Amino acid sequence: MTDVVVESLHVYPVKGCRGIDVARADVATTGLAVAGVADREWMVVDGAGRFVTQREHPQLALVATAAREGVLTLSAPGRPPLVLDGRAGATREVVVWRSAVRGFDAGDAAAAWLSTHLGVDVRLVRFDRSGVRPCNPDYAGDSGAHTLFADSYPLLVIGAASLADLNARMTARGFPALPMNRFRPNLVLAGLPAYDEDHLDEITVGDVVLRCVKPCTRCRVTTTDQATAHVGHEPLRTLAAYRMDPRFDGVTFGMNAIVVAGAGGSLA
């Protein structure tokens, strides 16, 4: 039997923006972190405080992120870098899906930087950790799992063979193969047969134990080229031919996971 290994790790400091590919990531109950900056710790919101992602503004795909010693830097084509030291600003109530939580506003300079890039008035907030955003207990059970600004769960796990199978189907239909960044995973596993992550219960890497709790229903963000922000129709049309899941009224690709042991450790 082929050994299953961690092929790659990815942290997305700002919900909807580009991630950081890392060789090692710290593990917290809320997911991965790098250099003192946590996955989906920051979020763009509209004037009403509701979350904004590539679903509404594909240009977020062009905002790159970098982390160093707790400092987050954003960059985009034709713009000077925006450096965020994470100092707490005014708190405000924000909404991500059905969760109302509090965030620290990053200030007018950050708002202006992002508003200019997107062409619409937005603000940037950082999760207020004085509160907790629980995961859905229908899937997370009584684990106490919670997350920051991720859609629902701390981590997304995808098998490399699953993407290879999808790309084989895509190229057979005359479409180009897609990179893994279309699916924005945190953890990519090599050595599993295609889609075997669907059937994993737990993933143990050293002292870290992750529990797979729910298939990930895919949205139109997967149709956005992460290098150009161009929006197309694939891979959703190809996935719909063989990955429709009536339980979730959509196509699934990858598994949402929670951290059940090893918080404070790391993955590499």
Image (cartoon, rainbow, N blue to C red):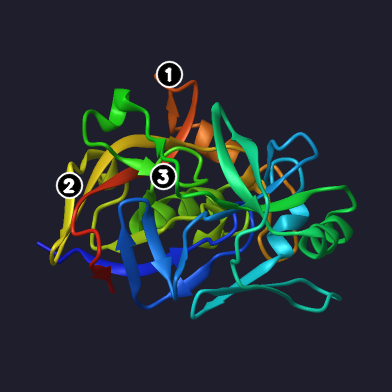
The secondary element bearing badge 3 is classed as: strand
Front in this rendered view, residue 84 or 162 = 84
| Residue 246: percent from left, percent from top | 43, 18
Q: Indicate left or right for 249 with 189 as reference.
A: right
Q: Is residue 182 above or below residue 238?
A: below
Amino acid bearing label 3? Thr
**Camera sees residue 135:** yes
Tell me which label, 1 or 2, sits earlier in the chain.
2
Image quadrant in which the C terminus is located: bottom left
The secondary element bearing badge 1 is classed as: loop
Tell me which label, 3 or 2, sits earlier in the chain.
3
Label annotation for residue 147: 3
Crowding at mark 1 (Cα within 10 Å: few <14, some 14-19, many 20+): few
**Residue sitting at x 40%, y 42%:** 153
Tell me which label, 1 or 3, sits earlier in the chain.
3
Q: Indicate left or right for 44 with 240 as reference.
A: right
The secondary element bearing badge 2 is classed as: strand
Label annotation for residue 246: 1
Image quadrant in which the N terminus is located: bottom left
C-alpha gap between disc 1 and disc 2: 24 Å
The residue that disc 2 covers is 202
| Residue 56: percent from left, percent from top | 75, 41
Q: How many marks?
A: 3
Q: Quadrant of residue 164?
A: bottom left
Amino acid bearing label 2? Glu
| Residue 228: percent from left, percent from top | 75, 63
| Residue 83: percent from left, percent from top | 69, 75
Q: Nearer the viewer, mark 1 or mark 3?
A: 3
Q: Is residue 237 above or below residue 174?
A: above
Query: Do labels 1 and 2 touch, CB within 8 Å?
Result: no
